[in-house]
Amino acid sequence: MVRPAAVALAYAAATVYGSWVAVLHDLRSEPFGRDVIPLPASRTVAVGLGGGTAIPAVMSAVAVLAAFRSERDPRWARVCVGIGSTSVVGTLVEAATWGRRAPGPDIGASVVLNLGVSVALVAHGLGSRSRTLRTAAGRGA
């Protein structure tokens, strides 16, 4: 069992590192290679929208909250699964993931970190959901 604090800290760290890499290389958010928000990465990251390797800050904040609350409420566990799954898909559709924009070791590390913590968040959500449902069934709720 992964502790909520570990998942929350890892997800927040991936957000910070991905944001730094996106700003450093001006990696705009380009899902499927299309520049949907024609602003520099520094601006999109500053307003919390994320960037090429940056998980949006709002998603990160909700993920941290959900990781802690998921131990007591299966609805928050579903939030963990949803955000983690969205982060996996979001990372995979970015042009930076496939080396189309400024390839480098820090970009690759950010992609791997994003995918790893996103899968960990999904696993945490699924595990928390099954534990809370079992506990509720044991109490006859």
Image (cartoon, grey):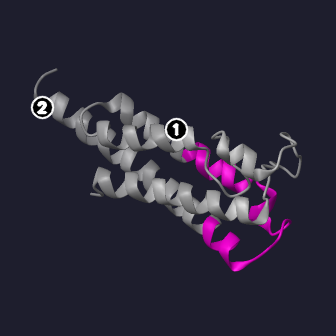
In percent of width and height, residue 65 lies at: 38, 38
- Residue closer to the observer: 30 or 92: 30
Between the residue at mark 2 and the residue at mark 1, the CA separation in whole angstroms equals 26 Å
Q: Which residues are magenta?
A: 85-110
Asked if residue 101 lies left or right of residue 141, the reply is right
Q: Is residue 40 above or below residue 75?
A: below
- Disc 1 marks a residue whose amino acid type is Gly
The residue depicted at 60 percent of the width and 43 percent of the height is 86
In percent of width and height, residue 22 lies at: 71, 59
Q: Residues within 10 Å of mark 2 (few under 14, many from 20)?
A: few
Residue bearing the label numbered 2: 138
- Residue closer to the observer: 41 or 87: 41
Q: Quadrant of residue 138?
A: top left
Q: Is residue 50 above or below residue 111?
A: above
- Disc 2 marks a residue whose amino acid type is Gly
Q: Quadrant of residue 74?
A: top left
In percent of width and height, residue 121 lies at: 44, 51
For the residues labelled 2 and 1, say whether their Cβ atoms are less than 8 Å apart: no
Q: Residue 82 got which mark?
A: 1
Q: Residues within 10 Å of mark 1 (few under 14, many from 20)?
A: some
Label 2 vs label 1, nearer the camera: 1
Q: Is residue 56 above or below residue 26?
A: above
